[in-house]
Image (tube, rainbow, N blue to C red):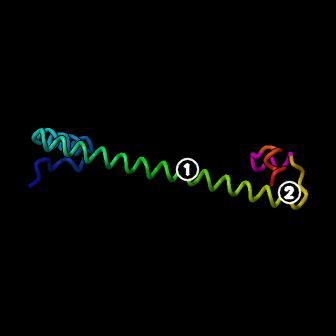
Amino acid sequence: MTAMPFKDKNNIFAHLETLSDYYAMDPEDRKLYDSALRRSRDYYATIESAKVEGRDEGRIETNVANAREMKKLGVDYLIISKVTGLSNDEIEKL
């Protein structure tokens, strides 16, 4: 039988069980746990940051490609700028 059989009914009880397990650790185990937790959080934060950066780079590349195509078709720079968010100078350099 689990120590807190009612934890499945309310998330707060699961959280409390986790806290009680944490504080039941000896200080050295708690240090190791905290260190592992920090590494894990840092890793996931780095991954999320890379995802956001990749999406941003993809949007920029797509906007540049679209602007290049619109420029080839003779679309007015003002329209290209509104659609892609690129400046007139950026469009001119394409």
Secondary structure of the residue carrying numbered label 2: helix
In percent of the image, x 14 and y 44: which residue is there?
29
Q: Which residue is mark 1?
A: 53
Q: Residues within 10 Å of mark 1 (few under 14, many from 20)?
A: few
| Front one among 3 and 77 | 77
Q: Residues within 10 Å of mark 2 (few under 14, many from 20)?
A: some
**Numbered label tally:** 2
- Residue 21 in which image quadrant: top left
Disc 2 to disc 1: CB gap under 8 Å: no
Secondary structure of the residue carrying numbered label 1: helix
**Marking on residue 21:** none
Rendered view: 29 above or below 64: above
Q: Position of residue 94 (x, y in %)?
A: 80, 55
Q: Which residue is mark 2?
A: 71
Q: CA distance from mark 2 to mark 1?
A: 27 Å
Q: Is residue 81 left or right of residue 14?
A: right
Q: Position of residue 46 (x, y in %)?
A: 43, 49
In percent of the image, x 80 and y 58: which residue is there?
68
In percent of the image, x 67 and y 52: which residue is there?
60
Q: Position of residue 66 (x, y in %)?
A: 76, 58
Specify the segment rendered in magenta: 78-86
| Front one among 75 and 93 | 93
Type of residue at label 1? Glu
